[in-house]
Image (spheres, helix red, strand yellow):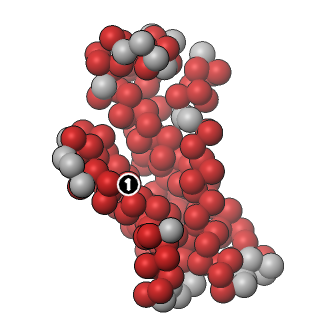
Amino acid sequence: MMKAILKEARPNQWTKNVLVFAAPGALGVLNEWEPLWKSLVMFVAFCLVSSGTYYWNDIQDVEQDRLHPKKKFRPIASGAIPLPIAKVIGTLLLLGGPALAASVRLEAGGVVALYAVLTIAYSSRLKHVALLDLAIVAAGFVLRAMAGAAGTQTPMSNWFVLCTTFG
């Protein structure tokens, strides 16, 4: 079951979380120990919380996923991870990410918690609302960069936010 638990966490999606390094990297402080380790902790925090959102998305969609030709093989839909266990793991990941980020800096924990709330709202209902779905996905990338900045106390200019938002 450990392989299924890791697969459900979708580690292939964790590359998105490197955005936490953007603000301190742009400021040129990642060669200093404190910003580097805080950025690494923020990366792990985002990996935890994003994995938790994948768990809860698949928990919410389990019945539809079981009927889907590809999604039916996902660990929750296939039954490789029983729903009660998936709920516990998903909840621990969702709570663990913001808690870990808050251990670096309270504001960073708040940004990661906001990401969790926004992403769960997206998975629950908002992914079916045209244009709002795209705005929420874009906001997720901006929140990653903001969390990295908050965790390292790196200032973010308006230009930096614009570049992060529009790529």
Image spot of residue 117 (x, y percent): 31, 53
Say if 72 sits above or below 9 in the image: above
Please identify the quarter of the rendering in which residue 118 is found: bottom left
Residue found 63% across the figure and 21% down from its top: 2
Q: From the viewer's perspective, is 146 left or right of 26?
A: left
Look at the image and tell me whether residue 81 can be seen. no
Look at the image and tell me whether residue 44 can be seen. yes
Residue ID for mark 1: 137
Image spot of residue 139 (x, y percent): 37, 63
Image quadrant in which the N terminus is located: top right
Closest to the observer: 5 or 14? 14
Near mark 1 (Cα within 10 A), the count class, few <14, some 14-19 or many ≥20, is some
Give the amino acid at mark 1. Answer: Val
Helix, strand or loop at mark 1:
helix
Circle count: 1
Residue found 28% across the figure and 51% down from its top: 133
Residue found 35% across the figure and 26% down from its top: 59
Q: From the viewer's perspective, is 58 left or right of 156?
A: left
Image spot of residue 137 (x, y percent): 38, 54
Residue found 50% across the figure and 68% down from its top: 167
Say if 61 sits above or below 13 in the image: above
Image spot of residue 39 (x, y percent): 65, 68
Say if 125 sits above or below 19 in the image: above
